[in-house]
Image (spheres, grey):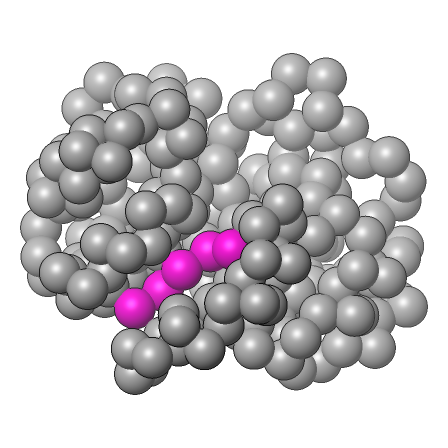
């Protein structure tokens, strides 16, 4: 199960992040679109170095040169430019790339350079009000032909629907709103993590 940071600031966010890692969080995608480069670096610096190998950056990729961070998320918008610049980005050994897509057809066409991809929104988004699935993504997964890249469900994922989501053909789930919109983020994480772990 993958966690994505809330785009905006959250009270005690870094403390919660450390507790999530302690409870078994495998990967944390850091997506903070409003932060300046300096603010983004300060945010990364506030996270214990022991967790850097589990961080995935959505922006300011160049800072990986100064950190033990080898995972980058390439947005749908930036994917074409990424293909043109792949050699430069992969000069650092062991780099891992993920991306985002919004249809199974786009997923099937992805280059094998991507370790995994978020397909969204599977359900109505919790973090983005009114952001609904435009079609039945769950049903579309049966048309999957790309088994090189792992398929990750995103959008409206909760502890109540994560198992059915994986059963439909996804390899894993990513969560955002159900964690950061919850009164007790850690407890919500435990519910999701327990459900996925028990199923697998």
**Which one is nearer the viewer's eye here, 78 or 113?**
78
Residue 187 seen in this snapshot: no
**Which one is nearer the viewer's eye here, 114 or 21?**
114
Residue shown at 75%/64% (left/top)? 107
Residue shown at 70%/52% (left/top)? 101
Q: Residue 40 location in percent, x, y?
A: 23, 36
Quarter of the image with the C terminus in it: bottom right
**Which one is nearer the viewer's eye here, 53 or 165?**
53
Write down the quadrant of residue 61 in the picture: bottom left
The image shows residue 55, relative to residue 175, as above or below, that is below
Q: Residue 84 location in percent, x, y?
A: 57, 67
Write down the quadrant of residue 53 in the picture: bottom left
Q: Residue 187 location in percent, x, y?
A: 34, 35
The answer to whether 137 appears left or right of 4 in the picture is: right
- Main secondary structure of the magenta stretch: strand
Q: Residue 132 location in percent, x, y?
A: 77, 28
The answer to whether 100 appears left or right of 95 in the picture is: right
Q: Is residue 121 magenta?
A: no
Residue 154 seen in this snapshot: yes
**Which one is nearer the viewer's eye here, 173 or 163?**
173
Q: Is residue 71 magenta?
A: yes
The image shows residue 156, relative to residue 142, as above or below, that is above
Residue shown at 17%/33% (left/top)? 38
The answer to whether 10 appears left or right of 124 in the picture is: left
Residue shown at 9%/57% (left/top)? 49
Q: Which residues are magenta?
A: 70-74
The image shows residue 87, relative to residue 55, as above or below, that is below
């Amino acid at each position: 199960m993958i966690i994505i940071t809330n785009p905006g600031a959250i009270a005690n966010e870094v403390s919660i992040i450390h507790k999530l890692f302690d409870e078994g969080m495998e990967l944390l995608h850091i997506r903070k679109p409003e932060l300046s480069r300096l603010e983004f670096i300060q945010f990364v610096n506030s996270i214990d170095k022991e967790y850097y190998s589990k961080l995935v950056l959505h922006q300011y990729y160049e800072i990986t040169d100064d950190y033990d961070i080898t995972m980058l998320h390439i947005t749908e918008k930036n994917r074409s430019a990424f293909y043109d610049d792949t050699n430069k980005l992969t000069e650092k050994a062991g780099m891992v790339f993920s991306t985002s897509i919004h249809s199974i057809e786009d997923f099937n066409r992805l280059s094998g350079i991507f370790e995994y991809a978020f397909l969204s929104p599977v359900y109505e988004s919790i973090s983005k009000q009114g952001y609904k699935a435009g079609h039945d993504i769950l049903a579309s997964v049966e048309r999957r032909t790309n088994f090189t890249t792992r398929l990750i469900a995103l959008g409206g994922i909760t502890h109540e629907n994560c198992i059915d989501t994986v059963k439909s053909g996804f390899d894993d789930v990513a969560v955002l709103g159900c964690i950061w919109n919850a009164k007790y983020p850690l407890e919500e994480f435990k519910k999701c993590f327990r459900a996925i772990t028990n199923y697998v």
